[in-house]
Image (cartoon, rainbow, N blue to C red):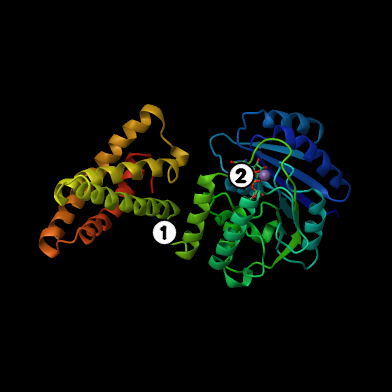
Amino acid sequence: MALRVSIVLPTYNERGNIEPLLAQLLPLRAQWDLEILVVDDDSADGTAELVRQIAHREPCVRLIRRVGRSGLASAIKEGLLDATGDVALVMDSDGQHEPASVQRAIESLSGAGPDLVIGSRFHPEAAILGLSGRRERGSTWANASARFSLPSCYGHLTDYMSGFFALRLEPLLPMIRAVDVNGFKFLYELLAVSRGRLETAEVPLTFQARTYGSSKLDLAIFWDFLISILHSLSFRLLPRRAISFGLVGLSGVAVQLLVTQLLTSLGGLGFKQALPAAVIAAASSNYLINNALTFRFARLKGVLLLRGLLKFLLVASLPVMANVGLASAYYSLVAPNAVGAQLAGIVVVFVWNYAASSRFVWNTPN
Ligand code: GDD
Ligand code: MN
């Protein structure tokens, strides 16, 4: 009996790319029992409508259309959980991954082969045509941190961030279920939750330039990746959002120290007069950065952004007062050391702020 192969194609605004890609993939029906799942996150350009039309004439094409559940890793997870093949392959649907590699990846899985085959852009035989120098350097850096944070048995891999990979569905299902989908990088998360239990291999990939549309990779996705690495390094004990909130908090520490410094040295204020203004500046900057990164799935805009700031300051005012009180007490009782005094106050308030603002400002349970 023919091998049943499920190809998962995440799409977000890929109307111009999906049809030519499907046309290249459909001939694979000749050798396999093929299923193609397109997971679309309610693209505004009509990708889903186009795929639905194609599915009318091509019964092996299935559309999974999601509303309000956006995110690449979560789209991949959903596609894999719905797939009915013996093996599944995930690839980008913007034409950057060449369909020619599909065959090779699936073949390397067959028989007593590995559980997971990764299409690598950094394999010695691979070629990268579609990445800017900056993106390529970024990926090299990201790969090095990924290698460092993952089990050492995956140290031979060369592309932990790839969006192209094939796997055996049944044995991997429990791990797929466990993947944390907050990030962009499904593969990295899969390797992390597998704790070194996977037999892995790589095939070279020629990474093409995009033909139509633009990349969805942005600063926020880079941030997610940084959080993923820290999450792995903390043995996945801390919630990802708490790590993000903590990092933003660190930037707030810098703001607070800087503003006090400015107000006392240039503004001529005393430490105790400068402190409240510095704490409010730091809290506002934390709020804005958290809104853009940590809670961007529930991002507040316009009037709501302003209302959120007031709520955040209110939620934070208890610990802010504790912060000011503690710092002042430290300053007068322990040592007149402005930096030490502020750090003491800041550490105490972190936990309260995270718990309370998740709940009351962005309405998400932690
Ligand atoms: N359903 C869904 N939801 N699909 C998405 C989303 C989303 O939120 N974001 C992106 N996609 C789809 C795109 O439509 C495309 O098919 C694929 O995921 C990759 O997205 P791109 O925006 O083209 O990513 P890239 O080319 O910048 O990134 C490439 O390199 C990364 C590693 O640096 C891709 O190969 C990634 O898969 C890879 O992780
Ligand atoms: Mn792309």
Q: In the picture, residue 300 is in which quadrant?
A: top left
Q: Which residue is mark 2?
A: 75
Q: Which residue is mark 1?
A: 238
Q: Nearer the viewer, residue 119 or 274?
A: 274
Q: Amino acid at mark 2?
A: Ala
Badge 2 crowding class, 10 Å Cα cut-off, few under 14, some 14 to 19, many 20 or more, is many
In the rendered image, the residue lying farthest to the front is 266
Query: Is 216 situated left or right of 301 in this image?
Result: right
Between the residue at mark 2 and the residue at mark 1, the CA separation in whole angstroms equals 24 Å
Q: Amino acid at mark 1?
A: Leu
Viewer-proximal residue among 188 and 262: 262
| Whole-percent x, y for residue 185 in the image | 59, 52
Q: Nearer the viewer, residue 335 or 198?
A: 335
Q: Quick one: 261 or 357, which is closer to the camera? A: 261
Residue 205 at x, y = what percent? 75, 55
Q: In the rendered image of this protein, does residue 346 appear above or below residue 356?
A: below
Q: Could you say whether the residue bearing mark 2 is in a helix, strand or loop?
A: helix
